[in-house]
Amino acid sequence: MDEKLQNSRRNTLKLLAMGSAAGVVGLFDSSEARADVYETPSYQKGAKPVTITKVRAIATAPGGLNLVVVKVETSEPGLYGIGCATFMQRAALVVTAVDVFLNDFCVGRDVDNIDDMWMSAYVSSYWRNGPVLNNALSGLDEALWDIKGKRAKMPVYQLLGGRSRLNVDTYAHVQGRTFEAIAEGVQKATEQGFRHVRIQQGGYGGVGTFQTPPDFKTANYARQTDGYSDTGEYLRRVPQMFEHVRKVCGEKVELLHDMHEQVEPIQAINMIKALEPYRPFFIEDPFSPENMGWFKKLRAATSVPLAMGELFNNINEFRDPMAEQLFDFIRIHISQIGGITPAMKVARLGEWYNVRTAWHGPADTSPVGYQANNHIDLAIYNFGIQEQQTIPQRVRDVFPGSPEVKNGYFIVTDEPGLGIDINEKEAAKYPINYKGMATVRKNDGTILKP
C-alpha cells in the first residue's frame, strides 16, 4: 500500500480513538495534520506570479495602412501577449508613447492585475482621454488579456463569461459609382452569406462621384487632391439609393449607411426621416461629437435606428446618451477608448438600456484588434453586429491566426488568449508612413468634418 495513504489512515485512526470532536477539529486544523491528510488540488493553488519584463510597439503597414501592435513580454520564458494600438493617422506618436512611457511604467508589475494597471496608467498622465495615450493603453490592455487567456489555457471570450452565440455576425461593405453597381454588389454579398450590407455611393458624402469640378479646385484654392462633396446632391441621392437597392435586392437583406458626420444636423434629420420606408438596420454617425445635443431632436423625429460613438475618446461620453436611449448601437473603436477593459464596461452598461454593440472595425484596425472585437462580441448579451473587413494575404502573413469569415460570420477559434500572433520578421518588411485623414471640402472650399 502507498506509504502516504498508510500514514493518512493511521492519522485518521488516531483521531477517532480520541473520541472527542473538538480534538478531531483541532488536530485537522493544524498545518501538520492537513499536510499529512489533505493535498491541495492543483485548481486551488492558482498560477504563480508573473511580471512584465518589457513592453514595446511594433509598427507595420502590410496592407498600406499604418498598424501598431503592442507586445508585452513576461518573466515566464516564452509567454507574451499582443494588443492593438492602431491610430493610423498618428501611428509614430503611439509608438513613442509605448516605447518611452509604457515600458518604464509597466516593467516589474504583475500581469494579472489588468484593471488596476489600466486605471493606474490612465490617471498617471493627469490629462487623459487623448487618442494617442488611449491607443497605447489599449495595446497594453489587450496584450494582458491575451496573456491571461494563455495562462488559463482558455480563449479570452471564456474569461469574459463564455459564448452567448454561435459566432459573430458581420456586415459587408458595398460601394459603387452607380445605384446599379451598388445593387449588384449587395446581391454578391448576400450570395456569400452576408445578411447585413453597408451601402455607399462613392466615398463618404458621395466623394468621387460628382462630375462638375468644385470652385475651390478651379480657383486653385487648397490642395487639388482634397475631396469634394456636393452636400445637396448627396442628401438627394441616399434615399434614391436605398429605394433602388430595395427594389432589386428585396426586403430580407439588412441595409446600413454611414453619413460620417458630413452634413448639417437639420439636413441629417430630414434625410433620415426620408429613409424610413426602406427600413435601414442603422444609420451611422449622423452628427459629429460636437453636436450631440441634436440627438434628442433626431430621436423625436424618426424611428430609424442610429449608431454613434466611433470618435468618442472617453467611456463616460457614452453614459448619458445610452441612459437617455438616444442611439441604438454603440459604435466604439475599441483601441480609441483603451482596449477590452473599458469596452466591456460600456457594453455592460448598454445592456441595461437595450443599446446594442456595433464595434468599429475598418481597414485601419489591425487583425489583433479584430480578434479583440470578436471575443467581446461572442461573450456579451447585447451584441448587435460587427463591422467586417477583408484581410489581404500579405496582412495575414504578418498576423498568423487572423480571423476568418464564413457565411457572413467571423469565426472565433478556441485558441488560448486572443488566438493571434505577429511575425515580426514579416512585419519589418512594411515600414509605416505618414497617413492623415483625407480632407473633404464643400464647393467653396469649406472643410467638412468627418
Image (cartoon, helix red, strand yellow):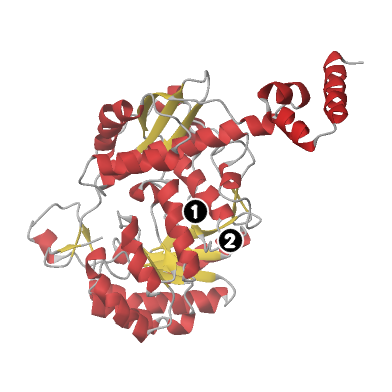
Q: Residue at the location (73% across, 28% down)?
A: 27
Point out the residue furthest to the top here: 3
What residue is disc 1 on? 388
Q: Is residue 119 visible?
A: yes
Q: Are marks 1 and 2 in contact (CB under 8 Å)?
A: yes
Left or right: 210 as drawn, with respect to 283: left
What residue is disc 2 on? 194
Helix, strand or loop for disc 1: loop
Viewer-proximal residue among 16 and 270: 16
Q: Residue at the location (25% across, 75% down)?
A: 265
Q: Residue at the location (75% across, 36% down)?
A: 22
Left or right: 249 as drawn, with respect to 315: right
Left or right: 345 as drawn, with respect to 286: right
**Marks 1 and 2, how far apart at CA:** 10 Å
Q: Quadrant of residue 104?
A: top left
Q: Quadrant of the N terminus?
A: top right
Q: Is residue 7 above or below residue 112?
A: above
Residue type at the position of mark 2: Phe
Instruction: Please tell me the numbered disc located at residue 175.
Output: none
**Which callout, 1 or 2, points at the residue further toward the start of the chain?**
2
Label 1 packing within 10 angstroms: few (<14), some (14-19), many (20+): many
Viewer-proximal residue among 200 and 153: 153
Q: Is residue 433 visible?
A: no
Residue 250: % across, % down: 57, 76
Q: Quadrant of residue 210?
A: bottom left
Residue 204: % across, % down: 32, 62
Helix, strand or loop for disc 2: loop
Residue type at the position of mark 1: Gln
Label 2 packing within 10 angstroms: few (<14), some (14-19), many (20+): many
Q: Residue at the location (35% across, 86% down)?
A: 301
Q: Is residue 364 above or below residue 264?
A: above
Q: Is residue 3 above or below residue 285?
A: above
